[in-house]
């Protein structure tokens, strides 16, 4: 045992009958790390269905506001529907990259959130505010440099120089208001972004709205032609821009027109019978609505598409040889004229629904369309479209 220990290069020390390993002392210097404010960029994720950009309707937060997961950040309008975006993090809002009415591309940061934790590698590329900009020191020399700068300011000006106070957000950013004030804005048809808020942090008050309504509005920019015609340019809304793209793209589809007349006397009697019976009535009499011809037409169309599936197919021209793509589901869309523009929500799995269920789904989609609350699920996946111009007097 003794010989083996001596042969080893390790330093051993014998005390009594025991051998102890002699190790050099380990020095562990004491050091401190400066706190790191993790600024996470909140990226606008891809909502799908080819949506490349959205327009911000309003912000529910402002800089230095604390948010938690699932808190509402802003409301955006795509070319299909309005969406409320919620936070994925707990933290403090540091910066809003866009104002109300601005257009945001998918994949761009909407805002920066200080989550008080380490930034994940995939977020480092999108961080718009560095640790130096955020005011957190990144090196041990920074406190010393700050002290030297402070001392030089005192010697030069006799007193330290302070940053200029942050100005209150102007009308373009003042989208904070109570529901009552928003109701007043809606009644007066005033855009909240045009009102200068005088409340805390630029909040729009009732007095601000009344003052804005009493002031004469400045006329929009106009262009007068040679013949005296006055032209005023107006930017298309996201839905109107999508209408232009879709209708222009539809010109590449081969068109044909077919007209026919049907005797619906029996259908008219059935509709009258159903409207007079209790089968279409709910427990709440206020919700009872008369059946129109549209649910019957949609049901008949769904059965026809189920029998002739080629009419439910789509034409794929992305390859060198055009081909038909057969689709297993029949989702019939209904063209609806809304204040925002023409939109086409669709009824999912239409052949499996009864006429009463189709009528209820039409009422649900119509109510959401008028309120601008249709979801992407309601608008995506349509396979066939029905346009009912009879409601506006068309034949």
Image: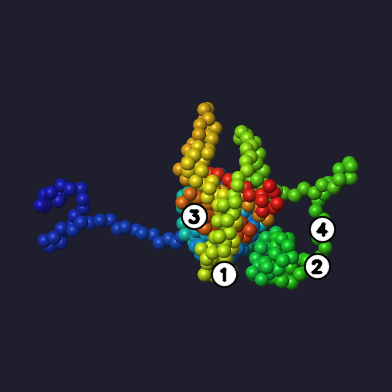
| Mark number displayed over residue 285 | 1
Element on which disc 3 rests = loop
Say which label, 2 or 1, has the lower sequence index: 2
Q: Residues within 10 Å of mark 4 (few under 14, many from 20)?
A: few
Say which label, 3 or 4, has the lower sequence index: 4
Residue 185 position (above or below residue 260): below
Please report contact status of discs 1 and 3: CB closer than 8 Å, yes or no: no
| Label 2 – label 3 distance at C-alpha | 53 Å
Instruction: Please identify the quarter of the rendering in which residue 328 is found.
Output: top left
Say which label, 1 or 3, has the lower sequence index: 1
Taking 59 as reference, is 209 left or right? Answer: right
| Label 2 – label 4 distance at C-alpha | 12 Å
User: In this figure, which colouring scheme has been used for the structure?
Assistant: rainbow
| Label 2 – label 1 distance at C-alpha | 44 Å
Of tags 3 and 4, which is closer to the observer? 3
| Label 4 – label 1 distance at C-alpha | 49 Å
> Which residue carries the number 4 mark?
218
Element on which disc 4 rests = loop
Q: Nearer the viewer, residue 310 or 47?
A: 310
Of tags 4 and 1, which is closer to the observer? 1
Q: Residue at x 63, y 49 (%)?
A: 388
Residue 287 position (above or below residue 76): below
Q: Position of residue 228 (x, y in %)?
A: 89, 45
Q: Residues within 10 Å of mark 2 (few under 14, many from 20)?
A: few
Say which label, 2 or 3, has the lower sequence index: 2
Q: Residue at x 82, y 47 (%)?
A: 231
> Which residue carries the number 3 mark?
354
Q: Position of residue 374 (x, y in %)?
A: 57, 56
Q: Nearer the viewer, residue 108 or 214?
A: 214
> Which residue carries the number 2 mark?
214
| Label 1 – label 3 distance at C-alpha | 21 Å
């Amino acid at each position: 045992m003794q010989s083996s220990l001596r042969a080893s290069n390790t330093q051993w020390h014998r005390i009594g009958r025991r051998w102890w390993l002699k190790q050099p002392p380990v020095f562990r210097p004491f050091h401190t790390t400066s706190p790191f404010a993790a600024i996470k960029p909140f990226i606008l994720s891809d909502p799908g269905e080819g949506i490349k950009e959205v327009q911000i309707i309003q912000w529910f937060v402002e800089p230095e506001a604390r948010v938690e997961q699932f808190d509402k950040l802003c409301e955006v309008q795509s070319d299909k529907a309005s969406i409320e975006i919620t936070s994925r993090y707990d933290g403090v809002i540091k910066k809003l990259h866009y104002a109300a009415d601005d257009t945001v591309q998918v994949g761009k940061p909407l805002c920066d959130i200080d989550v008080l934790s380490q930034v994940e590698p995939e977020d480092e590329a999108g961080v718009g505010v560095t640790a130096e900009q955020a005011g957190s020191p990144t090196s041990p020399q920074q406190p010393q440099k700050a002290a030297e700068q402070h001392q030089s300011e005192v010697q030069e000006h006799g007193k330290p120089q302070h940053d200029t106070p942050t100005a209150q957000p102007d009308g373009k950013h003042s989208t904070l208001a109570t529901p009552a004030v928003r109701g007043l804005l809606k009644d007066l048809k005033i855009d909240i972004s045009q009102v200068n808020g005088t409340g805390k942090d630029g909040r729009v008050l009732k007095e601000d709205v009344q003052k804005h309504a009493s002031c004469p509005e400045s006329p929009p920019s106009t262009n007068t032609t040679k013949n005296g015609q006055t032209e005023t340019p107006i930017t298309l809304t996201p839905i109107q821009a999508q209408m232009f793209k879709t209708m222009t793209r539809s010109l590449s589809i081969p068109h044909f027109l077919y007209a026919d007349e049907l005797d619906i006397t029996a259908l008219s009697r059935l509709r009258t019978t159903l409207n007079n019976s209790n089968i279409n009535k709910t427990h709440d009499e206020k919700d009872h609505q008369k059946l129109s011809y549209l649910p019957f037409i949609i049901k008949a169309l769904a059965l026809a598409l189920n029998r002739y599936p080629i009419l439910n197919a789509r034409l794929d021209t992305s390859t060198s040889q055009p081909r038909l793509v057969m689709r297993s589901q029949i989702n019939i869309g209904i063209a609806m004229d809304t204040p925002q523009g023409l939109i086409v929500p669709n009824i999912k799995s239409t052949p499996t629904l009864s006429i009463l269920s189709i009528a209820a789904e039409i009422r649900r989609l119509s109510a959401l369309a008028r309120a601008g609350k249709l979801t992407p699920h309601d608008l995506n996946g349509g396979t066939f479209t029905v346009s009912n111009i009879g409601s506006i007097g068309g034949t």
